Amino acid sequence: MSEDALPQPKPAAQDPSDGTLLALLIGTFFTIFTLLPGSSTLIVSWPWVFLWQVGLTLPMLWLLWQLWHRPLSRLGNGFDWVALLAIAGLVVSTLGAEFPAQARWYGWAAVGAIAAFYALGSWLRYPQRFHTLLRFQGYLALAFILLSLLLWTTQIYQPELARLSTLQGYGVNQTFNFELTSLRNWQPIGHQNYVAGYLVLVLPLLAGLAWSDRGWRRWLWLVGMVLGLLNLYTTSSRGGWLALMVTGLIAVGISLLYNRLPRPLALAIGGTALGLGVLGVIANPRLRQVLSSLAQGNFVGGELSYRVVTNATGWRMGLSRPFTGVGPGSVPLVYQKYRPHWAGRDAELQFQLHSTPAQLWGELGLWGIAVALTLVLVLVLLTVRWMRRGAQDTPAGLPPVLVWSPLAGLFAFGLMSLTDYQLDIPAIAGTLALYLAVLARTFNPVSTTEDSGATPRRHRLIAGVGLGLTLAMTLWLVPAYRAWGAASSGFSALTAEPVDIDRFANQLEQAHKLAPWEPYYPYQLGYHLGEFALQSAANPPLRQVLLDDAIAWFKTGNQAVPYQEFGQSNLGWLQVEKGQFAEAESSFREAIALVPAKMGVFFGLGFACLQTGNRDCATEAFALEAIRHPALITSPLWRVEGFADVYPAMLGQVEQRYDELIQQAKEPTLSSFLHQARGSLHWWRGDLAGATEDWQTNGGDLQQGFLSLADGQAVDVNPWPETPAKYAILAWQTPDQRQALLERAWVTQPKDIDDLAQALPEPQIISQLVASMETATDFTDWLQRTAPSWQPRSQRLGFGVLSRHIDGPNPSDFLPRVENIPVVQFFEPLFTSPVFLPALDRALEPYQVRLQGQ
């Protein structure tokens, strides 16, 4: 039998002080929230949020139960100092938070995780319990892996194959592509990075159990490892894959250093692991792309720039309050206050910063960094001390491989945590507490006879104080959960037939009274009452009442949290509807101060200024909106009375700003964008010579094609890549195949559209496009005069998740968008609005500041 083989567990003596029933309940909740599909978002919905709170409270009760029956043993080796530092940091940060209610709530959740750590450490009093606990985690990981693969196959992979098959009927041949976010395996936790984070934690444990166990269990763990690697591949997580590769290579090195494996075998395993890792990178286009971008220093667009923005935001948060941070749970409330304006349209609003160091620094300040560094230092010193002793045995008798396995999992997760924040995920937080408790007690086991004769007075007094604090926090949380339940009931009124507006408004108003610090309830009231007002044009008295109430509720939400562009800009549009143009101007200025690149904020300011007679302000605001969102100049809205008068002046102002920006531009990317955009403006205004000059060095096939079509020449698009523009131009040049070619242009979209109904062309729109081509005299006339338009609503798709409430429907903006369909669907590259181009937003900032000061 191998020296690392697990001994057969012996029954441990049952002790009432262990709190077995509470332990079983905690295990049940842990299992539920690990395997529950969509658990990361369900915990912010009713009634799952209540069950989540129960699950957080149970470890506290378990710890208090143990403390009532026996003194709490220290974890030793510095772990107690880490816990003390964390609690002190939470207290200080909560006391200094701008939004103390949210800070108390999230801080209390963190205390629950610390309680779980100590309760598990106290429960690990017998050697066999270590094995029981690790095997439990192993079985749970196996269930997670099987469930994840099953759900991904049935709910993502197979439907995508069916969608691709449908698209083939339109002549579009696409393959399964992990670059599309919706196709990555986010099951069951709710996000592919969360799944990858959990896997890098548990895969080393499965490896350790496979090494230690014998018989059928060894084969079970080995199969679990293989399936787990496959599961990790389906997440297409770059951080997870690279973290596991680095951890595996280090593990092979340690094995060679301590002769845990014969050198040839270790080298063979290491080479195989490295080869599989490299093969995984090569086989996954997303992993190849990120390595190529990093090698070139390219952070423009995509998820690299996304993390640059969130990390910069976190740095600013911590820098503003280095000794307290902004407070636990405050990131989504203050994010737009600290988000840099050069971020453009990237990462406009987040509830976490996608980096654990950034999150800890932003929310807790120096305390968060101190806790993280102290924990790392404790683990490193503990490991080094053990390695100096030979790393062959432990005081608790746990086989060395089952010490290395949790350490490897923590190391891999630590690497991944540099690019993501996952400590608020129950499955991950619970696994971390379990690993840390095992490691702490492995090197500092509990004596089952210590303090047997000690007086219970002191520790029972501490338990009583702890119970009182727990009850006080529970009572404080009761109104918050009552509000959640009331709001959930109110939202159900929106789906009733007919819609019960009164019940919705009464329930949401009750929720607001119970939790006035939550902006979610007044925002939902403001949006829905505003929506009902706009739909009540036939009943002017009712419309006015609803409009007044909607405006009042948006103001209430903005008072609760003043750093939300959504609340400020939509309040502005409702004030415009009410005729309160001066107030609307102020609201749009507030929105611009938060997210100046957001579509519609400068347009709203321009409209409000136009109504107050400030034509210069209106022209400049419209121009700044058009520079950041060039497709605006193609909107049929400019033919409407009121807008038509200012349109020529706005176009002239846009061109003047382009000229100035090009003269000032120093970065090639900015210069290229500006020439391309000014060329499109010249083409739209009929200045083909100016367009030709701008597009000579900064144009491609599409730009040259537009110039040829404007001259009445045919364009050979066959060599062009598969783009919507290619087939739209083919449709123009091939009248007898227009419908089929326009349908193909519609489905040839580079966007991540997982809904097949949205990806397929609507027959009515295709018919309108065909008719508009038939009535146009030439290609330019089609785009500028006869092209059909639509009025889409800008949806706030992530509103619920970002607000940490998903019970209600996601709202849409009141921004009146009128878009030229061919331009936005087929020819977007000519009028593109860059998501991330810091040089552009920095260049525009002086103009924006000047307008804000008017």
Image: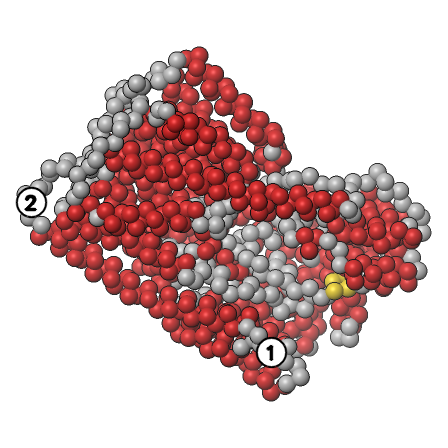
* Left or right of residue 521: residue 134: left
The reply to whether the C-beta atoms of the residues labelled 1 and 2 are less than 8 Å apart is: no
Q: Please tell me which residue lies in front, 579 or 229.
A: 229
- Residue at coordinates 65% horizontally, 65% vertically from top-left? 793
Where residue 583 appears, x then y in whole percent?
A: 57, 76
Which quadrant of the view contains residue 723? top right
Q: Which residue is mark 2?
A: 454
- Residue at coordinates 37% horizontally, 65% vertically from top-left? 481
Q: How many angstroms separate mark 1 from mark 2 (CA)? A: 70 Å
Where residue 154 appears, x then y in whole percent?
A: 57, 45
- Residue at coordinates 17% horizontally, 54% vertically from top-left? 463
Where residue 772 appears, x then y in whole percent?
A: 86, 62
Query: Around disc 1, counting alpha carbons within 10 Å, would you say few (fewer than 14), some (14 to 19), or many (20 or more)?
Result: many
Which quadrant of the view contains residue 681? bottom right
Q: Quadrant of the N terminus?
A: top left
Q: How is the image coloured?
A: secondary structure
Q: Quadrant of the C terminus?
A: bottom right
Q: Which disc is residue 533 wearing?
A: 1
Residue 517 versus residue 309 in the image, above or below: below
**Mark 1 residue type:** Ala
Q: Please tell me which residue lies in front, 561 or 842.
A: 561
Describe the element under mark 2 as helix, strand or loop. Answer: loop
**Mark 2 residue type:** Ala
Q: Is residue 521 among what the camera can see?
A: yes
- Residue at coordinates 44% horizontally, 58% vertically from top-left? 44
Q: Please tell me which residue lies in front, 585 or 506.
A: 506
Describe the element under mark 1 as helix, strand or loop. Answer: helix
Q: Is residue 387 among what the camera can see?
A: no
* Left or right of residue 51: residue 780: right
Which callout, 1 or 2, points to the residue nearer the camera?
A: 2
Where residue 750 appears, x then y in whole percent?
A: 70, 46
